[in-house]
Image (spheres, rainbow, N blue to C red):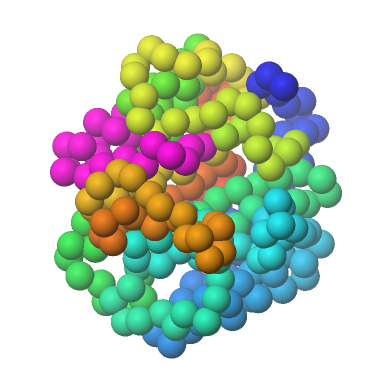
Amino acid sequence: MGIIIKTPEQIEGIRRSSRLAAETLKYLEPFVVPGAKTIDLDRKVEEFVRDHGAIPATKGYKGYKHASCISPNEVVCHGVPNQYELQYGDIVNVDVTTILEGFYGDTCKMYSVGEISPYAQKLVDVTKECLHLGMQECKPNGRVGNIGAAIADHAHKHGYTVVYEFCGHGVGLKFHEDPEVAHIAEYGSGAILKPGMTFTIEPMINAGKARTKVDRKDGWTARTIDGKLSAQFEHTILITETGYEALTDVYGDF
């Protein structure tokens, strides 16, 4: 397919969808509390997205039945909403992709359920830092690989591992486009970044081993191989003439 350079009109559509995705995560904040079932949080996501004239991109995607992915604790990504009740001290990721007027916006963030342990808090903080360090590598004539190199350097410095089995991706006109954005890579590798490119950066950082295993029961939920915690943050990024714009960074809170 190749990397799609978006027109100004397309960029504006992607920006609107990205804003809605960010607003959805903000709306969800007061509901992420001890005792909340992840299936109920997913219903709130779908109601909010549809009430704002959009549809959730994940629903029906390759047979997936839900409006979001909700991944607590050792779940790395693609957590299927179910009857699990959030526990005090959990960390949980919610990933939302909206389709608004045909354009896609994709974002995810971590929530703390009550007060979390210093061990969990450090993982969450470092993962957020990894995202921002990757974003700082986004500029015209930079390389896609620089993003993953910066992320991996920071994660490894803190004793964490980087999930390599899942990656960021182009987004905007389709759910998944070129390029792939690996979160562990070498400086100077990968495609050249050009104005008008839109893609996600979504590092998944593990407290233990980097590998994951997908639940056989649902075929989606990816967990850490050793049961240790994982964290993830994600923004949809636009390469501009002078640097980048994080289209889903509406509130500046992650």
Q: Is residue 78 above or below residue 85?
A: above
**Nearer to us in this view, 126 or 9:** 126
Segment tinted magenta in the rendering:
150-168
Residue 117 at x, y = what percent? 20, 70
Left or right, 207 with reference to 110 = left
Q: Residue at x 81, y 62 (%)?
A: 53
What residue occupies the far front of the structure in this picture?
A: 216
**Nearer to us in this view, 43 or 221:** 221
Residue 60 at x, y = what percent? 74, 58
Q: Residue at x 46, y 26 (%)?
A: 138
Q: Is residue 21 above or below residue 104?
A: below
Residue 163 on the magenta span: yes
Q: Residue 114 sits in which quadrant?
A: bottom left
Tell me, yes or no, if residue 57 can be seen here: no
Left or right, 157 with reference to 62 = left
Residue 170 at x, y = what percent? 61, 32
Q: Residue at x 51, y 44 (%)?
A: 235
Residue 219 on the magenta span: no
